[in-house]
């Protein structure tokens, strides 16, 4: 594997949209018992369901610790799927491949490379979710080694994959609450951060939404509140409840989106995707999470609001893998997504177990584009 000293923009590479054809999806097996309840067994069942849903459309590679190899294989390969589910041994700190895996970039000739962002567990020692993250910071490099793809490393820039979303035509969505947080790149102002994003994603227009989803412990990643459904079309998490603090967050995002233009000068069409009813972690759900932990920044307390959102879905080759929460809006969201993606089949997968750990389906997946 070659580590390059140039940037993707220097070399004519850019981040493609998530709906561009995939070679495979990457995931990481959950096992951290100070984050996942009941020895991570319910989470493992949930991740298995997501992986097997994706494998209806494209191959999946699951990264698994040596301790869990046999268990993961037993779950993932219990019965055949149309596409393969590969299990590869790797050491990790937790299971959020969107944030620890590489952000893949491509050029017009169909070559693929990867951006390896510096990772500090969503804030390092200033609000981060665990105090040791060296294994997770190495995940992107190891994936690129496995695939024998060139690597762009950003030793002076901290970012997570869930903090960015592109249309593949030069437009990027981010949130101020995350990227301008002092626990990521405290010595960089907005202009300096934009220059890094332009250099490594090769985008022209960056749209800054003020906030994300209430109580999102990633410091409000954009992939939980808004995403592109197509160039010029944005899906936005929405509530009509003016007494909910999320109303102000979503309204502020809508105001930005309605006055902005994308990189091609287009006005943005906004589709409001209703949120599920507010959900809260229950005492019995958190009672079996190990209390002996180095997760110094993480709290799992009963009656804590969960950052549930249907925006946290995953686009794969011909499919949309969408979380469901046993909520009346499950089917409303699924229907809106089916309309927004007429060439994709919506597959709903239970999302609560993943949400209890701090994220959802988009957070645990990372797409690798096809190569020429």
Image (cartoon, rainbow, N blue to C red):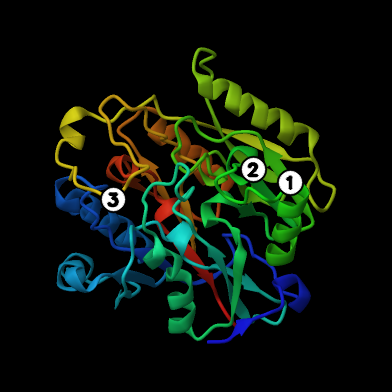
268 up-or-down from 88: above or below: above
Discs 2, 1 touching: Cβ within 8 Å: yes
Q: Position of residue 93 (x, y in %)?
A: 33, 60
350 up-or-down from 165: above or below: above
304 sits to left or right of 292: right
Residue on which disc 2 sits: 180
Front-lying residue, 319 or 46? 46
The answer to whether residue 56 of the structure is visible from this angle is: no
The outermost residue toward the right is 265
Q: Determine the CA span between mark 2 and mark 1.
A: 7 Å
The disc label shown at residue 321, or none: none
Q: Nearer the viewer, mark 3 or mark 1?
A: 3
Rendering quarter of residue 49 = bottom left
Q: Residue at x 46, y 83 (%)?
A: 145
Q: Nearer the viewer, mark 3 or mark 2?
A: 3
177 up-or-down from 35: above or below: above
* Mark nearer the N terminus (2 vs 1): 2
Mark 2 secondary-structure assignment: loop
141 up-or-down from 367: above or below: below
Q: Position of residue 53 (x, y in %)?
A: 34, 59
Front-lying residue, 196 or 294? 294
Q: Position of residue 220 (x, y in %)?
A: 52, 39
Front-lying residue, 101 or 188? 188
Q: Residue at x 32, y 46 (%)?
A: 354
* Mark nearer the N terminus (3 vs 1): 1
Residue on which disc 3 sits: 294
Mark 1 secondary-structure assignment: helix
Q: Determine the CA span between mark 3 and mark 2.
A: 26 Å
């Amino acid at each position: 594997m070659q580590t390059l000293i140039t940037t993707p923009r220097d070399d004519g590479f850019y981040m493609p949209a998530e709906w561009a054809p995939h070679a495979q999806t990457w995931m990481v097996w959950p096992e951290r018992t100070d984050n996942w309840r009941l020895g991570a067994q319910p989470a493992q069942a949930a991740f298995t369901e997501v992986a097997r849903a994706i494998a209806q459309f494209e191959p999946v590679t699951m990264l698994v610790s040596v301790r869990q190899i046999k268990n993961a294989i037993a779950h993932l390969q219990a019965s055949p799927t149309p596409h393969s589910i590969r299990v590869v041994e790797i050491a990790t700190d937790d299971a959020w491949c969107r944030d620890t895996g590489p952000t893949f970039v491509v050029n017009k000739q169909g070559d693929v490379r990867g951006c390896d962002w510096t990772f500090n567990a969503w804030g390092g020692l200033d609000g981060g979710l665990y105090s040791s993250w060296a294994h997770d910071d190495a995940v992107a490099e190891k994936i690129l080694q496995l695939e024998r793809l060139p690597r762009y490393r950003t030793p002076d820039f901290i970012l997570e994959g869930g903090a960015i979303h592109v249309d593949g035509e030069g437009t990027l969505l981010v949130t101020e609450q995350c990227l301008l947080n002092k626990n990521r790149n405290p010595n960089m102002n907005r202009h300096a951060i934009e220059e890094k994003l332009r250099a490594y994603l090769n985008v022209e227009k960056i749209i800054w939404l003020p906030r994300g989803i209430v109580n999102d412990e990633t410091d409000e990643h954009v992939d939980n509140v808004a995403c592109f459904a197509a160039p010029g079309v944005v899906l936005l998490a929405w509530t009509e409840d003016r007494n909910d603090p999320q109303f102000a967050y979503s309204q502020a995002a809508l105001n930005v989106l309605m006055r902005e233009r994308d990189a091609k000068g287009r006005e943005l069409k906004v589709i409001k995707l209703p949120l599920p009813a507010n959900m809260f972690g229950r005492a019995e759900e958190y009672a079996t999470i190990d209390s002996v932990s180095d997760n110094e920044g993480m709290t799992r307390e009963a009656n804590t609001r969960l950052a549930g959102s249907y925006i946290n879905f995953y686009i794969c080759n011909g499919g949309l893998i969408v979380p469901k929460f046993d909520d009346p809006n499950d089917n409303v969201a699924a229907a809106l997504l089916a309309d927004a993606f007429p060439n994709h089949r919506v597959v709903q997968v239970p999302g609560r177990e993943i949400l209890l750990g701090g994220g959802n389906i988009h957070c645990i997946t990372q797409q690798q584009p096809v190569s020429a």
